[in-house]
């Protein structure tokens, strides 16, 4: 097993926990957690907000464990390095190899991007309503205008939210972004590039690119 496969399996387990926790179907294999969540009698919006919290908590937990195994943070009150090997004795990680993979898979959502034709993955910060943001949630698939500071040109960008169907005012949420047009952005974007998203002339949030999926948009490094 490679380091990438090791980290990927943690991510798959995280997704499985989320899916099972919010599976409210009437069947004998329902989890205890999904049963208790349903007993809260949350409406759809409340359920989505709760799911967002659980998703963020699981990301922080799994990511923290992986960094702990890599020796780059503590597990409990102890920080040390670990050598991880599979049943066949093959070394999976000797320290320092997990952190980069864990960031790309858990924080930048590289695996989600690989299975999608999006242009990039971004962390979106929705403004609070009282600070000029939307008055209501946005559904996954929402298409606001996107503007980068280095150009006056705008294009709409479809936001597909990862692990959630809704994004609420004040939310920070990862999303797959598919642009309507890309000609004015070719060769100009980098991981870390910031942008605004708007409704008309009203800025309702900002975003930061986590990983670029469309290589035509990537700015060449010097």
Image (tube, rainbow, N blue to C red):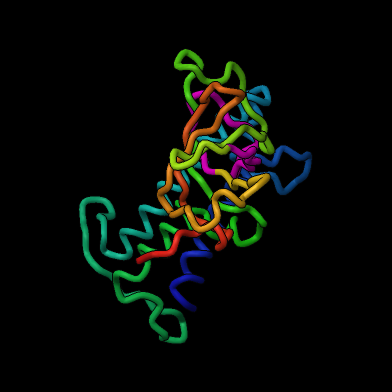
Instruction: Tell me if residue 92 comes above or below residue 21 in the rendering.
Output: below
The quarter of the displayed image where residue 75 is located: bottom left
**Residue at 46% across, 86% down:** 88
Residue 11 appears in the rendering: no
Is 141 positioned to the left or the right of 177 in the image? right
User: Which corner quadrant holds the C terminus?
Assistant: bottom left
Q: Could you tell me residue 36's position as x and y percent?
A: 61, 33
Residue 209 part of the magenta segment = no
Residue 159 appears in the rendering: yes
Instruction: Tell me if residue 190 comes above or below residue 147 in the rendering.
Output: below
**Residue at 65% across, 39% down:** 22
Q: Could you tell me residue 129's position as x and y percent?
A: 51, 16
Is 210 positioned to the left or the right of 186 in the image? left
Task: Write down the region rendered in magenta.
Answer: 154-174
**Residue at 77% across, 44% down:** 27
- Depth check: give the residue in front, 4 or 87: 4
Instruction: Tell me if residue 185 comes above or below residue 222 in the rendering.
Output: above
The quarter of the displayed image where residue 154 is located: top right
Residue 168 part of the magenta segment = yes
- Depth check: give the residue in front, 40 or 13: 13
Q: Could you tell me residue 116's position as x and y percent?
A: 66, 56
- Depth check: give the residue in front, 198 or 222: 222
The quarter of the displayed image where residue 39 is located: top right
Tally the marks: 0
**Residue at 67% across, 34% down:** 142
- Depth check: give the residue in front, 202 or 164: 202
Q: Could you tell me residue 66's position as x and y percent?
A: 38, 60
């Amino acid at each position: 097993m490679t380091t990438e496969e090791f980290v990927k399996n943690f991510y798959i387990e995280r997704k499985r926990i989320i899916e099972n926790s919010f599976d409210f179907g009437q069947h004998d294999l329902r989890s205890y957690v999904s049963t208790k969540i349903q007993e809260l009698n949350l409406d759809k919006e409340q359920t989505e907000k709760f799911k967002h919290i659980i998703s963020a908590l699981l990301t922080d937990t799994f990511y923290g464990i992986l960094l702990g195994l890599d020796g780059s943070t503590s597990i409990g009150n102890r920080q040390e390095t670990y050598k991880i090997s599979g049943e066949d004795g093959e070394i999976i990680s000797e320290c320092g190899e997990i952190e980069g993979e864990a960031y790309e898979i858990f924080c930048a959502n590289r695996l989600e991007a690989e299975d999608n034709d999006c242009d990039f993955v971004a962390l979106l910060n929705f403004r609070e309503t009282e600070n000029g943001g939307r008055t209501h949630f946005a559904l996954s698939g929402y298409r606001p205008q996107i503007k980068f500071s280095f150009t006056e040109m705008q294009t709409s960008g479809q936001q597909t939210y990862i692990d959630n169907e809704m994004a609420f005012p004040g939310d920070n949420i990862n999303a797959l972004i598919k642009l309507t047009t890309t000609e004015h952005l070719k060769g100009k974007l980098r991981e870390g590039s910031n942008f605004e998203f708007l409704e008309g002339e009203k800025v309702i949030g900002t975003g930061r690119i986590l990983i670029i999926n469309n290589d035509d948009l990537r700015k060449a490094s010097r």
